Each structure stands twice: as C-alpha cells, then as structure tokens.
Image: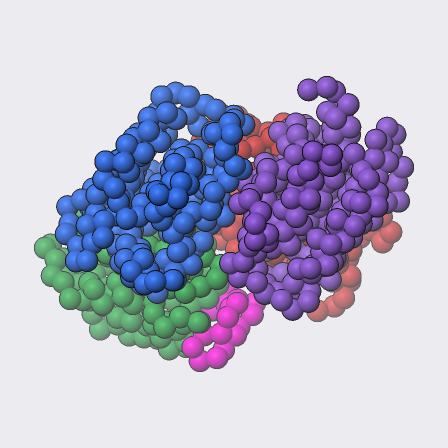
Chain colours: A purple, B red, C blue, D green
Amino acid sequence: MKFLVTGFEPFGQSNVNPSEQVVRALARRQFEGFAVETAVLPVHRFHGPQTLLTHVQQTRPDAVVCLGEAGGRTAVSIERVAINLLDFRIADNNGLVVQDELISADGPAAYFTTLPVRALQQAVAAAGIPAELSLSAGAFLCNQVTYELLHFLAQPQLAIPAGFVHLPLLPEQAANQTPLRPSMALDVMVTAVITILHTLCTQLRTPR
Amino acid sequence: MKFLVTGFEPFGQSNVNPSEQVVRALARRQFEGFAVETAVLPVHRFHGPQTLLTHVQQTRPDAVVCLGEAGGRTAVSIERVAINLLDFRIADNNGLVVQDELISADGPAAYFTTLPVRALQQAVAAAGIPAELSLSAGAFLCNQVTYELLHFLAQPQLAIPAGFVHLPLLPEQAANQTPLRPSMALDVMVTAVITILHTLCTQLRTPR
Amino acid sequence: MKFLVTGFEPFGQSNVNPSEQVVRALARRQFEGFAVETAVLPVHRFHGPQTLLTHVQQTRPDAVVCLGEAGGRTAVSIERVAINLLDFRIADNNGLVVQDELISADGPAAYFTTLPVRALQQAVAAAGIPAELSLSAGAFLCNQVTYELLHFLAQPQLAIPAGFVHLPLLPEQAANQTPLRPSMALDVMVTAVITILHTLCTQLRTPR
Amino acid sequence: MKFLVTGFEPFGQSNVNPSEQVVRALARRQFEGFAVETAVLPVHRFHGPQTLLTHVQQTRPDAVVCLGEAGGRTAVSIERVAINLLDFRIADNNGLVVQDELISADGPAAYFTTLPVRALQQAVAAAGIPAELSLSAGAFLCNQVTYELLHFLAQPQLAIPAGFVHLPLLPEQAANQTPLRPSMALDVMVTAVITILHTLCTQLRTPR
C-alpha cells in the first residue's frame, strides 16, 4: 500500500511549518506494510493545488493525507469537509489575498473528506495524543487544496480515500509569538501521523 | 552547585503529573556543573509543604525549583509571587477543600519568588520552548508550598533562591479530557527545566 | 418585505435560549419598511426542521433568518455554510444522540447560505457589536435546520435568501456555568438582529 | 454611607474605557442608602495613584471601589490582591514603559484587598451577571493604584475597605479589534457595580 503525504512550505510570519517538518521526517523513514511518498506544497493559490494534483498523478497512491499548520489549535485536527470558498485573512506566499471567491465556479459547495475520520481520531487519541474531528479547514490554502483534490478524485475511476489533517504550531514557533498559543512537539506530531497511516492501512485492507 | 527540584504526585482526575515525570527524568541523569536532588510532594494540605521543607533541610541546596501542573496553560510558566491564601477549587488528595483561608495566620500577604525569573523566561524561550512570566500560582498546593518555602527561607541565614514553575498538561492527559486543552511533550518540559537549571547556575555564579 | 426569523427553545443544561428571547423581543415590536414573522423551533431532530419548513410555507417570507445559541462564541456569528452531517455532542430535547449520520441521504455535502453575509457582518460590526463570519454551524440542530431549509429552498421557484446566525450565551446563562464563557446582553443581540434585518432590506431591494 | 468609585481614562489603542463609562453613569444617578463620589484616573504612572489618593483624602469615603478595563476577560473580575510590581506590556498614556520595578521600595510584596470579595462575587453572579474572583490584577496601572491605595490605607486610623474590580471590554471596543475578544454591555456592567455597592452597604453595616 502506498500513501501520498503532503505538507506546506512556511507562510505568514513564520520560517518553519510543522507540516513540512513532519513530511521531511516521514521521508527519512521506512515503514512496514506501506510506503510513503511525500511532497511539500507551495502556499500559492495556483501552484499549491497544481503541485498536489501533479504528485497524485505521478505517484498513483492508494490514499492521500495532506497536512497543514493551524496556529491556535491544541490538537491534531482531522478535517471532515472542504468548502468551495477562498477567503484569505493573510496573503499567500505570492502576495495574493482573495476574499469571498469560489474555488471552482461550477463545483459543489463542499466535499466530505473520504478518510475514515472517526477511526483516525480515535486511534491518535488512544496513542495519547490530543486529537479532534474538525468541521472546518478554514478558507485558505489548506481548505483549497483539499477541495481541489476531492474535486479531482470525484470520478469513479479515481476514487481513492483522501483527506486533510491540521497540526498545531511547533514549540519554536509558539515561543516567538505574542500572544502565546498552544504548540505540539514535532515527535508527537510525527507519531500522530504514523498512527494515522497505520490505522488507514488496516481500515483500507478491511472490506467495509 | 546543588539544586533541589521537586514535583507533585497526580491529583484530581489524573493518574499522572507532568511535574513528577520531569523530576523522575532529571533524577536519572547526570549534569555537568551542578547536582540535582529531587523529591515528589504529596498533594496534601499538610504533608505537601512539610515534605518540601524536610527535603530543603536535608539536602541543603543552593537553590530550589518547585514544579507543578497547571492544566490549561500553554507555556512553561515561571511564577513571580506566592500569596497567603488557600482557596481550593478541587479537593487535595486527602479529600480536603479549603476556601478563603490564610496559609500563615501571621505571615505577609505574599512573597516574591527569589529566582532570576526574567532571565529564566528568556532562556527557555530562546531554547525554542514557549515560556511566560506568571503573576499568579493559583491558590491550591502549588501556591501553598511556594509560599511556605519562601516563608521558611525568609531568614537571613537561609536566604537561598527559590521559586516555582508551572507546567502544561502532558499530551496523554490532554488526549483524555474534554474540552481539549493545550499540552506539552515531556521531552520539551525536561529540556525547559534543564535550561532553567543551567541558567540558574550561570546567574548564581555571577556576582550581581 | 416580510422576514421569517426563528429561534430555538432551550436545550442541554439551560432553561433559556438567547435565540428564543431575541425572537420574542422582535415579535413584540413594529418595524418600518418590513414585517417580521417569528417562530420558536423545538430542539428535536425531526420536529425542528419540520416546524421551520411549515412556517416557511405558511408565511411565504421574502427571506429567512434562523437564530441559535452557540455557547463559547464571543460574537454574533453569521454562518456561511451548512453541511450534510448530524454529529451531536449532547442529546436533543427528545433524548436522541446521533453520530456521523447524513441529514439527507441523497443531498449534497453542503449548501452555502444565501444571505449577503459579508454585508451583514460589516453592518453589525459598524453598529459597535462584535460580529464574525463563521465557516461552521456545527453538526447539531442549528446546522441541521439550516441545511434542510436550504435544501428545501434549492428549487428555482423557492429561491429566497436564507441563512443562520449564532448568538453567544446570555449573561444569566454564563453566570451559572463553570468554566466562565463569553456572553452578550439580550439588548445587544436584539440590536444586532434588527441591524441584520435593516441591512437585508436594503440589500434585497437593490438590484445586484 | 459614602463610596468613592473610580475608573480610568482610555489607554492603548482604545478611545473609550468601560470603567470610565461606568463611573460617568453612576455619577448621573442617585442611590438610596448611599452616596457615590466618582473620579476618573489618568493612565499615568505618577498621576494615576496621586489622583486616586487625593480623591480619597478629599471625599473621606466609607469604602473605595476602583474599576479598570481588562481586555480578554469574560466576567466582572473582583481582585483579591495587589502586588508590589510594575511590569508594563504597553506604555502608559505618558509613553512610559516600566519593567520589573517595585512600586514601593520598602513596601511589602502585596496587599490583600479589604472588600468582602466572596460576598461581592456571589451577589453579582446571583444578579445573573458573570463574575469571578481574580488572583491577579496584572502589573500595570490597575494593580499599581490598588497597591498604592492599600499601602496608603494600611494605617489604623485610615482602615476603610478598598478594592479593585476589572471589567471586560465594551461591545464597541471588541467589535473593532482582531482577534475577537469577549465583551459586556455597559448596562450590565453598571448593574454589576450597583449590585456591588448595595452588597457593600449591607456588609459594612453588619457587625462582623
């Protein structure tokens, strides 16, 4: 079984992104029972989703898990839904701010993610790591790439499970910000994502 | 140079306490330039401070750093002050709830902690770990042992530096609680406390 | 112009609901330029949306603004989207807890609300009342009635604007809860909703 | 019975201060059973406490209740203690930022406020208004004037009850800030402070 796991490059005021760090840590490791392909996506309205879809087409994975940073969250947040909306509070790395625009002019209002989100949340929490199901991935790049990925995969022959997981700030990011916000150590986040991949592996092999 | 570092046993709904875990991790290690004596205090209105003072008298340290758990905090919180007040929101481990009582009938309203708190906060933050100066250690055991320690040390011949550091929940504690609260990995907290001890070592050796 | 404004009856631990109070306050008033019909919906998986749709059919309004309580929010929250998901954290007033079920087996994943949400948020904030655009109405009754309303109205001949606004707790609710949560005075919420109706009135009369 | 109630002028980014608004509202009213003298203090390290002490000497009140703004708090916060510390996060209105200085070089570390804080908190909550006891008034002007007031009154012949109450932001302040923070309507805060004065009146007339 092969997973594509993606992160994002740093954006905003930060020169590091936990999702990129997790992806780089996964890329250095071998796993039993599954292989992991990784990619780091640009925080760019156009190149972000393009890069993701290119990697999906090139790697032909059995499932896709996209990761991103969500400053302010305390837990590993497994997203349930991506909506057809761009509403940026800050500029992307191309300097672009978009307000109240559709991602896809003729796409549906939303797609549910197609990972077994409840099982993933329970598995991460059972591993002793704070985890939650989230009803909103925001309206920035994280939501956008998820929506575009699910839109792309919404064809019968491409129907592989795909979803998005938001990660808290790294301690070193939170240590340099005012006001103080929650953080999570890189090791803990890597363990959470590996737990997600193992759970996915089991779930996807089990006929439902 | 010799430090006494104390933690607390678990209390409330939890069967683990990050301060105990940090103290046990320190006890297994050797440090260059200083020695660390440790103790785990009972969460008990009477035995808590008694155990602390007994260890201070037995170990005769050059400085005392007490640690405790503060569910809800996002950062390593270096306390500036302890007040002469007992006002428990939950029972201690002896089942005792105290409301609006003095710790010491004839003691002052408060003592400032006597560690170089600003330098400690800056050193922990510089190590990439969220850290803050705190103006309140609460009105439970953490505040009480700090007050009683500073009251005891408020004699010229005993004037060693002493203070208190509150730690966030461990991930495994936060993973099993509703609502979600911030957490910090044990390794990160151990690094923070070692950074505090190294900084103390440097500061105490430098004539001020 | 005629508006239908709905609230909900109390639920959970509370014997009051700010949305019901606002609706009752509106029902006692006359407005210049528009009429307001009101209804209070049961917090009941089946009767909640049924009652709403019955009122829509009976009153034939020019727009529908549903109100509900969102404990923990600090601002008047104008919802952008309702999703096809029931995932109750607490029971409805019929004792029913639903997890991970669709609202409509063959409905789309979500509907965007069809009120001019940006203009409404700006108008409330300009009136000196904290207001925000929200990307999630949750997965309880508030989201459900919004989804079912938008599903019902998604027919060309019924295409009237409709949406949902979440309100903070009333002060008397927050005063009796631990931990403390934000609240907003009833008068302030009534003013916010009247501001929304006046803004809607202007917006709907202006050809776009 | 005569009370002195003080507020502060606006500071920081704001051109309004809830404590000033409450004090101005009280000054326009008559009360049965007690008289209220009011003053608005400058947010100025030197003139703030001076103005307060001048008013205390001129009005010779039976009790003093100082009010101030605490952005971020959700409840009427009745302070228990003021500490001998100046540590400003923002400049006072004179452009002065003070870090880690004592208020009084030879004063004690802290004074407990001398109002019946528990009874006041219970009375406000019973009136349906969120209220809490607070263990820290910060280290800015609010804490400073309280400390200096209690220091001044710490002479047997001047021993009148005195304390401090922090108020949340007004809705119009919170509506113009990012991120959103809790607020409380002016009417609610005025009712809270009148409840405090009535409770004080009863408590101070009752021999304890």
Observer-nearest residue: B131 or C46?
C46
Observer-nearest residue: B55 or C97?
C97
Whole-percent x, y for residue C22 in the image: 25, 45
* Residue B156 quadrant: bottom right
Whole-percent x, y for residue A31 in the image: 87, 34
Q: Which residues are magenta?
A: D84-108
* Residue D174 quadrant: bottom left
- Image quarter of the N terminus of chain D: bottom left
Q: Could you tell me which residue is drawn at 66 percent across and 59 percent down?
A: A45
Q: Could you tell me which residue is drawn at 20 percent across and 54 percent down?
A: C34
* Residue A37 quadrant: top right
Q: Is residue B112 visible?
A: no
Asked whether A1 falls inside the magenta stretch, the response is no
Label the magenta part by its dominant secondary structure. loop
| Drawn side of residue C87 relative to residue B34, left or right | left
Query: How many numbered circles are shown?
Result: 0
Q: Is residue A117 visible?
A: yes
Q: Could you tell me which residue is drawn at 80 percent across and 45 percent down?
A: A57
